[in-house]
Amino acid sequence: MKKTLISLGLIAALSPAMANAAGGYVGASLGQTTYQDLDTEEVRAFESAMGLSIDDEDTGFKLFGGANFNDFISMEAHIATLGAVTIQNNFAKAEVESTSLGAALVGNLPLGEHFKLFGKFGFHFWDTEIEATASNVTFTQDLDDGTDTFFGAGAVYQMDRFSIRGEFERYTLDELDVDFISVGLAYHF
């Protein structure tokens, strides 16, 4: 929680600086996250043997802000919750949730006055927390954290000061990848 508050403060502090570039923007996205490599034969065999169910899809949310240096190059920062993996049986339930704070260099390809495609590559700091419940007792603990890469691609349709974006992003968390497909709305300065 403390890292999330610090991250939000950092984005809020950087927003005016990013807005003073050739064109700044802030926005939010909502979508589906999928934790990759959890649907393998080995995992399915483990689920069956232990009587577990594993749900590797959840809802993700992201706040972002950026600066357009020109029509082709931007810099973007974000804070995101990447959803959770839920593991449960008849007696217990555990949710492993990940958050991300990162920055990326964005390449834009304008296709007319209102539409553009973009691709991005960057680095992010991530944190993973586990919440487990058994016999009406719940505990929460930090599980792991690190710094890794992420990339993404998408399309933007801009109408005056507002834009709608659809994008795909892949976040690396050590040796695990999380895909985030989202739709967002941004306000441009």
Image: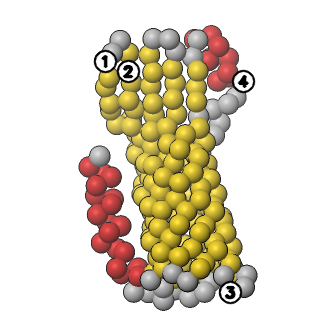
- For badge 4, the amino acid type reads Glu
Q: Look at the numbered disc 3 and give the secondary structure of its residue.
A: loop
Q: Is residue 127 left or right of residue 84?
A: left
In primary-sequence order, the first of circles 1 and 3 is 3
How is this picture coloured? secondary structure
Name above or below for residue 63 compared with residue 179: below
Query: Can you identify the residue that label 1 sits on?
Result: 137
In the picture of the structure, the residue carrying the numbered disc 2 is 133
Question: How many numbered marks have been drawn onto this rendered protein structure?
Answer: 4
In space, the residues marked 2 and 3 are separated at their CA atoms by 52 Å
From the top left corner, tell me how far across and down residue 168 is, in percent.
Answer: 64, 57
Whether pointer 1 and pointer 2 mark residues with C-beta atoms closer than 8 Å, the reply is yes
Q: Mark 4 points at which residue?
A: 41
Separation (CA) of disc 1 from disc 3: 56 Å
Q: Disc 2 marks which amino acid? A: Thr
Task: Give the mark nearest the N terminus, 4 or 2.
Answer: 4
The nearer-to-camera label among 2 and 3 is 3
According to the picture, the residue beneath numbered tag 3 turns out to be 113
- Give the residue type that dot 1 points to: Val
- The reply to whether residue 57 is visible in this rendering is yes
Point out the frontmost of discs 1 and 3: 3
Q: Is residue 174 left or right of residue 13?
A: right
Alpha carbon of mark 3 to alpha carbon of mark 4: how far?
Answer: 48 Å
